Amino acid sequence: MRAAILTTLSVVPFLAFAQQLPQPSPSGHVEQVVGLTTIKVDYSRPSMRDRKIFGDLVPYGKVWRTGANKCTTFQTEGPVKVEGVELPAGIYSVFTIPGEEVWTIIFNKDTSLWGEGDRKEEADVLRVKVVVGKSYEPIETFTFSFANVKDDKADLVMSWESRVIRVGLFADATKQGLANIRAALAEPSPGAGAYNRSARFCVDRGMMLVEALQWATNSVSMEKKYWSLYTLALAQAANGKTKEAIATAEEGMKVAQEEKSEAYVKLFRERILEWRRAPAGTAK
């Protein structure tokens, strides 16, 4: 009996240690592909709880861990420009210096930190400054998010209380995209989709336009779909072939109408009007 009691008592501390309860500042995670680069942010999310945050709980002019608990980490699989400044691929802790009008964003190579007090300036990899934005509605919980995700660009957004901080990111996908195109088209039998995607990538970036036109032509010859006809029309226009682009767009609009794709019908109609207004040989 004595042994059984001792055994039971010895289990109590372990159970207490393993107890799971809601955290005041729960963990959060956001992830976004920008261009071809995956970017991840892991952080803890404190809430206002009827407190004044900036200029009080989080003082102006002092380094803040930018969240709660373990420091926020920012991971990028490839090099990325932060507000126009290069940040190599890697994982970084994120600190900020809040101000009433401008914030300083700091990326530090030590990701084991639990507070701003242990941060060493010599481990800072990058500092940028951004202008503070305002929210018309109070934001109860500190939040990281991504916005304005387009092509190779996105904004990393921090929002809390009445503050919205947008940090511009740029991850150039051109080099990797071209490498992927070369690999796809080097296959023994590239499909219509491979030709279409390759053509659209180059047309959208205004490069290798002659090759893009040939790839778009190949795609349509293999499989005539409204989306491949749209790419072909764009490629023709980009090469100054306005008359051909309009004819292709008119054909594509008919196919889109038959397939009941209102979105593409609208796109074709807009491009036709645009190209008809453009002087011959100048449509892009």
Image (tube, helix red, strand yellow):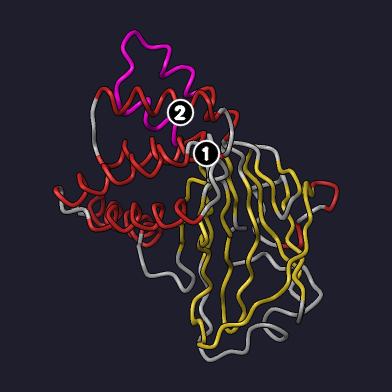
**Residue 154 position by quadrant:** bottom right
Main SS of the magenta part reads helix
For marks 2 and 1, the one nearer the N-term is: 2
SS of the residue under disc 1: helix
Q: Nearer the viewer, residue 221 or 198?
A: 221
Position of residue 82 measured from the top left corner of the image (x, y, whole percent): 69, 52
Q: Nearer the viewer, residue 199 or 52?
A: 199
User: Which residue is pictured at 48% across the width and 40% down the height?
Assistant: 237
Q: Can you say whether 192 is above or below 230 in the image?
A: above
- Say few, some or many: other residues with alpha carbon within 10 Å of mark 2 (under 14 / 14 to 19 / 20 or more): many
Q: What amino acid type is highlighted by mark number 2?
A: Leu
Please state if 61 lies on the left or on the right of 64 as rendered.
Answer: right
Position of residue 42 measured from the top left corner of the image (x, y, whole percent): 52, 54
Q: Nearer the viewer, residue 22 or 204?
A: 204
Q: What amino acid type is highlighted by mark number 1?
A: Ala
- Total marks placed: 2
Name the residue carrying label 1.
238
SS of the residue under disc 2: helix
Residue sitting at the far top: 188
Name the residue carrying label 2.
213
